[in-house]
Amino acid sequence: MIEESEWVAATIEAFFNLGIKTLYAGYRKARRLIPLRGERPELIRHLFLDSGDFLFHPSSNWSPADGQVNPPPAQEGYPHDISALWSFEPFLPDRTQLKDSLLFPGKLTPTTRLVCSGSPKSNRFTRQYLPSFAVTADIPKPQYPNAISPERLTYLFGEDLVAPKIQVVSMMHKGTLQGKTRKVIWRWHRGSLIPWSPAEYEKDGMLYKGFLLVSRLPRTKAGADILAFAGGHGAGTQAVSLLLAKLPFGELKALADVIGDKPYFQFVLEVSGLRHEASGTIPTKVEISSALPPVALENLTTRDLGSAAKQEKK
């Protein structure tokens, strides 16, 4: 039977035989995958909140395409969108007080930063800053006026008005099965817009895999910004909670490496493991898309803001 002292000595010798370089490489790999206490919250704050005067705004006012019907009115925001923004609560300073309704009254100041959940279709602030194009039988058609030219961004939101609708269990319609227009992300290729959606987007007519497009964009020339979490459907938007709490730490670190200290960025999460429950379609897994990798919008500045930004005052 080996003595404890002999086991310790053998272990030390084995480590030295590996070599310092190998040990250091292993340590660096472990540090990227395993956060120290408090490291994940700090990284979340660095990526998404930083500092300053910011307000949360869940979707509450759809702007339907021709022939589409408005969903039920929502005085406090739509369920998936509220859930997404409430997931930020553990990462906020202790002194922060959140109202039952995250929707805010009154006008915004030039320095107010916005954190918005929901797509351009359903959130009026996201609608004014993140361009959205519809898939039509002809050419991509812009859906709303925008403060930022589409050419200044890498990824744009989109809605497919041609393909058959996709089925989800809607929280907005009391857990009933509802047909929704398919959503896409547009990306630029040689000057043209190409639509993208996750592989296995649908299965037997039901939403099987969704997405979440995250964009931080300038809001005012005074330096305020908007952080938009635009889900392809409600389940995509609700995946914000999985991004904050469940995305592997190594992927968060890699995301931070790409973004660096750049003020504006975009990335895409592929959302899977959807459960069509009685209350709604719920996501369980997320991963950063390799097909649409994260980008720092290095050339985007407040000078790119157009007159459409004035519409938020109306």
Image (cartoon, helix red, strand yellow):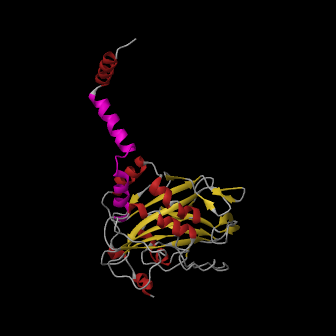
Q: Which residues are magenta?
A: 20-49
Q: Main secondary structure of the magenta part?
A: helix
Instruction: Choose top left, top right, bottom left or bottom right for residue 104.
Output: bottom left
Q: Where does residue 307 sit, x and y in percent of width and height? A: 40, 83
Q: Residue 298 vs residue 237: left or right? A: left
Q: Is 285 rendered above or below residue 128? A: above
Q: Is residue 54 visible?
A: yes
Question: Observer-nearest residue: 145 or 53?
Answer: 53
Question: Outermost residue, bottom direction?
Answer: 314
Q: Residue at coordinates 47% horizontally, 66% vertically from top-left?
A: 86
Out of 48 and 137, give the one closest to the viewer: 48
Residue 31 shown in magenta = yes
Of residues 252 and 173, the one nearer the viewer is 173
Q: Which sits in the foreground, 53 or 167?
A: 53
Does residue 256 lie above or below 304 as drawn? above
Q: How many marks?
A: 0
